[in-house]
Image (cartoon, helix red, strand yellow):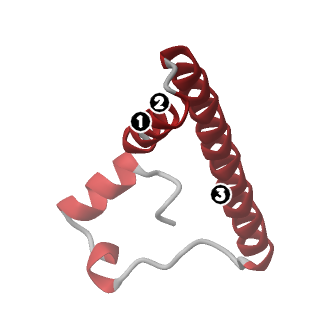
Amino acid sequence: MTATLLVVLGWTYVSTGSVWASLGWTFLAGVVLQAGYFVAVLWLVHAESRVTDETKATDTGAAKLPGPFERDGIIHALISLLFPRLLP
């Protein structure tokens, strides 16, 4: 973003010869870039929530843990303490 704003600053200064016009256009470009970034993040979050909702609808139950974690021992005890809803 900084590189883009520096290009806009230099380009408008060379084109107009005015420092104030260059600063104005650079500020406007920064606002447009930030708004675009905000919209892109919102779109990604919305897409992620939509995928999560679809997987919840098709989920049949709790995930099965691999064999070594189902044995008795310190790993099982630690997992059951840290994540009580993970183990049956």
Kindly report the distance in space between the C-alpha atoms of the residues bearing marks 3 and 2.
Answer: 36 Å
Residue sticking out furthest to the bottom: 67
In the figure, 37 relative to 28: above or below? below
- Tell me: 49 left or right of 22: right
What type is the residue that disc 2 sits on? Tyr
Residue 43 position by quadrant: bottom right
Residue sticking out furthest to the left: 74
Q: Nearer the viewer, residue 68 or 10?
A: 10
In the figure, 17 relative to 45: above or below? above
Residue at 49 percent across and 79 percent down: it is: 64
Q: Of the residues under marks 3 and 2, which one precedes in the sequence?
A: 2
Kindly report the distance in space between the C-alpha atoms of the residues bearing marks 1 and 3.
Answer: 32 Å
What type is the residue that disc 1 sits on? Gly
**Residue 60 locus on image (x, y percent):** 71, 79
Q: Nearer the viewer, residue 39 or 5?
A: 5
Q: Circle 3 is placed at which residue position?
A: 44
- Dot 3 falls on a residue whose secondary structure is helix
Q: Circle 1 is placed at which residue position?
A: 10
Pointer 2 local density, CA inside 10 Å: few below 14, some 14–19, many at least 20: some
Residue at 28 percent across and 56 percent down: it is: 77
Q: Circle 2 is placed at which residue position?
A: 13
What type is the residue that disc 3 sits on? Leu
Which of label 3 and label 2 is nearer to you? 2
Pointer 1 local density, CA inside 10 Å: few below 14, some 14–19, many at least 20: some
- Tell me: 21 left or right of 43: left
